[in-house]
Amino acid sequence: MDKEKLRLDKYLWAIRLFKTRSQAADACDKGKVKLGGQGIKASRTVAIGDEYEVKTEAKRWVIKVTGLLNHRVQYSEAILHYTDITPAEELDRIKFQAAVFHTGKRMSKQGRPTKKDKRDLDEFLG
């Protein structure tokens, strides 16, 4: 399972931070993956102990490589190959965003009236 040479884009895809390998490579090209504050290429070789800052659509990860993984596996196995060392303030920001994220359902009792509201209103007006 371990290989001596493993590309960064392949590793990020294998540990399930990105859905496709091309998305992982694009993130590297756009500077969304950093090692020590410097943007790095998708072709960079991954080494155990490296700490990467990865910005995905969902959140900003800070991960430490604990094992090399050259093929995609299920989530429960993939999480064994890295340690999530994302700062606590980032995790708090994500929880806050999730709490205020608009789900498509009505927030509280504002907006269009429901069928029940309409019936009550018709009954009230006679």
Image (spheres, rainbow, N blue to C red):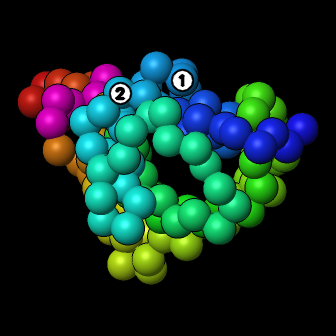
Q: Residue at x 17, y 44 (%)?
A: 110
- Picture coordinates of residue 81, whole percent (x, y): 76, 54
Image side of residue 114 versus residue 63, left or right:
left
- Disc number for residue 49: none
113 within the magenta span: yes
- Closest to the observer: 77 or 113? 77
Residue 7 appears anywhere in the view: yes
Q: Residue at x 39, y 39 (%)?
A: 41
Main SS category, magenta section: loop
Q: Which residue is mark 2?
A: 26
Quadrant the N terminus occupies: top right
- Disc 2 to disc 1, C-alpha distance: 9 Å
Residue farthest left in this picture: 125
Image side of residue 48 versus residue 10, left or right:
right
Total marks placed? 2
- Comes first in the chain, label 2 or label 1: 1
Report which quarter residue 91 is drawn in.
Answer: bottom left
112 within the magenta span: yes
Residue 116 appears anywhere in the view: no
- Disc number for residue 21: 1
Q: Residue at x 37, y 55 (%)?
A: 34
Question: Is disc 2 placed on a helix, strand or loop?
Answer: helix
Stretch of the chain drawn in magenta: 111-116
Residue farthest right in this picture: 1
Quadrant the C terminus occupies: top left
Report which quarter residue 98 is drawn in.
Answer: bottom left
Question: Is disc 1 placed on a helix, strand or loop?
Answer: helix
Q: Amino acid at mark 2?
A: Asp
